[in-house]
Amino acid sequence: MTNDLFCGGLDGLEARLREDLDRLNFDGKDWVPQRTVAGQQVRDVVIIGAGMCGLVASVALRRHGIRNHVLYDMAPEGREGPWITIARMETLRSPKQLTGPAYGLPSLTFRAWFEATRGRKAWDALGRIDRADWMDYLTWYRRVMDVPVVNDARMTGLAEGPDGLIEVTLSVAGRTESVLTRKLVLATGRDGLGGNYVPPAVRDIDPKFWAHSADEIDFEALRGKPVVVVGAGASAMDNAATALEAGAERVDILIRRDRMPTINKGMGVGSPGMTHGFRGLPDDWKWKFQDYIGRCQTPPPRNSTLRVSQHENARFWFGARLDSFREDGDRLVISTPRGEFRTAYAIFATGFAVDFEQRPELALIAPHVRLWRDGKVDGARAQDGLAFSPVLGDHFELTEKEPGACPMLSSIYGFNFPATLSHGKLTGDIPAVSEGADRMVRGITESLFVEDVAEHYARLEAYDEPELLGDEWEDAEQARASA
């Protein structure tokens, strides 16, 4: 089989993509009435985050004729998301053939980009996607789809704007700016409504002794030193391997469980049924699915685990529950049922939590966001970390704890990992992210139209472009009289 489809390399692929977009009439009519307030343009949608979720949300908005939107990302261009910053795996976990954010466009897939830049033989030989290649692909995706991104821009606050608008305050390259928007999308990743989770006692330890696996870490400074990694997931293996490869004296991996999880339960139910049907389940079934998957835990990838175990100075300790911590000179001492571990540095691969105290920019809405623990689950489960997930509407919109207390929540969309309990895994992983973006944007489209219904009706009444000119027929009586 030849590679005729992408003849001409990347230039040829981009030409094909332009043809695809043209044939699909992808850029439809920009139908949303434009607004200004005191001379300031009002955005229809502002997206916070220009990683994978933000990019595909922008493409979905474009497909639905909502062109007046903008994305803000705190990272410099080309460094959005975790891929070349805090991600430490060698390759992605997702199978290479998944179409991810391509939004149904074959010429926008990673495969199309990879074959255009490396060739078909390289694709056939590829096992898993290198994370740096994935970042390069997303950078190309942003360029060819003309996604409007402002980099070096961090959201610092929210306020109620005039006429029901949302005012977003940002620090853009060190300058304070504000933008008015009708809808706000939080495409802010795994820690999008909170931050890193570590055992509470760790917060009392001098930060020179520890980091979370999602922090920036100077691994070269760990050369020749003992390191502890807490956890058994993918990030635990990735950080342990990185420390070992940087020359750590040894790495002790402390795992609370008595055995390593080996089965990725989530893979057992991945299907269009799960993608499109999970939202329609009763609350008890949603909880049952996600709680079971969480309790079983997702095992680390085989290649990530082998990347660690190939080192003779890597030690796996099972049943190593964390009992206490104390500082002792230049060492941190961690007590567990498997003994004490004296370490120069500990890396906690302990996940993320919904925690609005770690998100001061959301202080205005934080008291009003309804969480699953607010009546969706019984008291025995209310303290479970899963119960702190937000309760989202049919299109990822936040909902109110007390109806009427914070109406702006219906215009703020949680298109980030904490949406999983309400919608399934449509916002945090590659497989179904396009379906998630489409679901959200259909809701945004409906909401904007409903809000502007009077203007749309006025347009209907004012429309007067004739299709018939009056010379296409003749009245029967007139025809008889003229005969």
Image: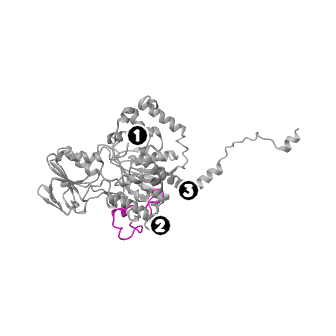
Rendered image: mark on residue 404: 2
- The tag earlier along the polypeptide, 3 or 2, is 2
Q: Residue at x 43, y 40 (%)?
A: 109
Q: Nearer the viewer, residue 270 or 48?
A: 270
Q: In the rendered view, how is the structure colored?
A: one colour
Give how far across and how far down residue 308 sits, in percent.
Answer: 23, 47
Position of 475 compared to 466: left or right? Answer: right
Hey, what amino acid is under mark 2? Gly
Q: Nearer the viewer, mark 3 or mark 1?
A: 1
From this viewpoint, is residue 69 visible? yes
Pick the quarter of the image with the N terminus. top left
Q: Under tag 1, what secondary structure?
A: helix
Q: Are marks 2 and 1 in contact (CB under 8 Å)?
A: no
- The tag earlier along the polypeptide, 3 or 1, is 1
Residue interval drawn in magenta: 373-399
Residue denoted by label 3: 450
Residue denoted by label 1: 110
Hey, what amino acid is under mark 1? Phe
Position of 395 compared to 308: left or right? Answer: right
